[in-house]
Image (tube, rainbow, N blue to C red):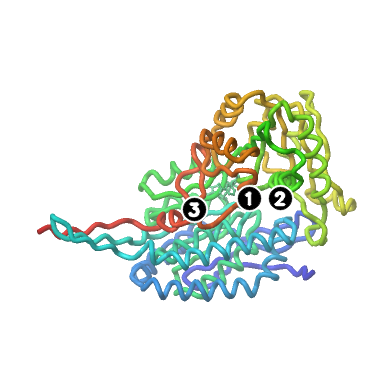
Amino acid sequence: MPNEQITIHAIINGEKVPTEKQAPRENPTHPDEIVGYAPLNTKEETVQAIDAAYNALKSWAWTEVEDRMERMERAIQKIKDATPEIATLLSREHGKALYDSKGEIAISLMWMEFACKNVKKVVSPQEKEHENGRTIITFDPVGVVSAISPWNYPISLSTIKIAPALLTGNTMVVKPSPFAPLAVSKVVEIIANEFPPGVLNLVHGDAEVGIELTSNPKVAKIAFTGGTKTAKSIMKAASETIKKMTLELGGNDAAIVLEDFDVNDEKAMRRMVISNFLTAGQICMIAKRIYVHRSIYDAFVEKYIEAANKWIRVGDPFHPDVTVGPVNNKNQVKYVRSLVEDAKSKGAKVIPLGKILNPELMDNGYFLQPTVVLGADYHDPIVVEEQFGPTVPILPFDDEEQVIELHNESIYGLTSSVWGEEEHAVKVARRIEAGTTMINTAAVQGLDVQFPFGGVKQSGVGREYGEEGLKSYVETHVINLPK
Ligand code: NAD
């Protein structure tokens, strides 16, 4: 495994910009190893990037969609060719297992291809003759887009914004998270090289850069994925100039297991386990609480633990048998540990899961032993907070009204899943407040880029993926020619 240090740069107006200040990115598996350095851009550099996007917009907005598609298709091919190198870098800086990094790049490419194939449908003007005259409707770019992404899926949650924004004629500034800035920068660089200078700019840093990106009057749209708390300050910053917004935020997704779920269905159990512990549980759309009908609760817990012990193998992300790597950063380790300790101190039973393949790494790296928590109260922090780590509480319920209420009382509503006889599960799903509800699988496995994805309540505003995801980057312009 190559372990050289990488230095990345901001990209402003097609140029790589050297910066004075840089932040090291550590390897969560071996925190004393620095994987690379990302710039800490200043407010002035961020303004330069926004200005570059603003100036490039004047001509880019009027380019032919075929030209944009060709450029994106070239970028897709280059990302495909570079996948092994990018996936390796992602696993080193993030901690996710290598197969998981490859999976993230694969879903990014799937979406970029979908966006290329479907953009014409979204931007082609419509013309109608009617009794009052003639009407032309065009679908124009919104303008300069600020795209801000989190650390858990840095590549897919950036390309989910870049592909539709550029294909529909917008220009943009992208800012990844300082907790996983390196691999995504390689991807952004590949794409930026296929487009004219200023169309796709890249800056790095944290809140200071983010605040400029969300308040600068030249920015027309914000595409943000991250925490609900950050989104609240972004909404305030953006309100001054009424920016368009897509917000993909936190969740406290539930899995509801009905009395007619077959606990002996090993495949379904495996799907459920993967959907709780993939990427060490650091995914917005995986179950963070499991409610099981009391009549099958004990049998379910036994089979769930059996399935988890088979699938979970914790260790070095580059070990071929490892399914769960370390957690991304020290704060996250502390936070998840505090939730589990809190539940334990209140009498809950914490059961360790899986096999540790590299015991020598556990003390130094940011590892957490995956666990299930039994006997927690419905309103304990381990149940109502978004843990974002490798732990999940399993709780019994007595009837559907109760479980639907428990589900819907959350401030979040991103994804959810219902497990049981199909028609019964659909009936329950219809009453669930969420952007996506999966039946007998979880969103992370059934994810399909052709369908819109997003949250209700405090889990978000708007949708990404699908045609809706493309449409959120255009403004409808009606040109009327009355008789
Ligand atoms: P975060 O909100 O801390 O950071 C997200 C991004 O916002 C980072 O790039 C950060 O630098 C930037 N930022 C911080 N302060 C800012 C400010 N004041 N103005 C503008 N930008 C600012 O989130 P995180 O810890 O990186 O990611 C985890 C969160 O993301 C979880 O809550 C998770 O559920 C959520 N998430 C949601 C989805 C979804 O699709 N709904 C997907 C992945 C992650």
How far apart are the two marked residues, 2 and 3, measured between alpha carbons?
22 Å
Q: Which residue has dot 2 on it?
A: 278
Q: Which quadrant holds the C terminus?
A: bottom left
Q: Which residue has dot 3 on it?
A: 464
Residue, x 49% and y 49% (percent of image)? 211
Q: Is mark 1 within 8 Å of ligand 1?
A: no
Residue, x 44% and y 61% (percent of image)? 50
Q: Earlier in the sequence, mark 1 or mark 2?
A: 2
* Image x and y of residue 264, in percent: 77, 40
Quarter of the rendering containing residue 137:
bottom left
Q: Earlier in the sequence, mark 2 or mark 3?
A: 2
* Image x and y of residue 56, in percent: 39, 69
Q: Which residue is outermost to the right? A: 360
Q: Is mark 3 within 8 Å of ligand 1?
A: yes
Instruction: Give SS at disc 2.
Output: helix
Within 10 Å of disc 1 (Cα), the crowding (few <14, some 14-19, many 20+) is some
Q: Are marks 1 and 2 in contact (CB under 8 Å)?
A: yes
Q: Any mark on residue 444, and which?
A: 1
Q: Earlier in the sequence, mark 1 or mark 3?
A: 1
Q: Any mark on residue 363, and which?
A: none
Within 10 Å of disc 2 (Cα), the crowding (few <14, some 14-19, many 20+) is many
* Image x and y of residue 176, in percent: 57, 57
Residue type of the residue flagged with mark 2: Leu
- 462 sits to left or right of 358: left
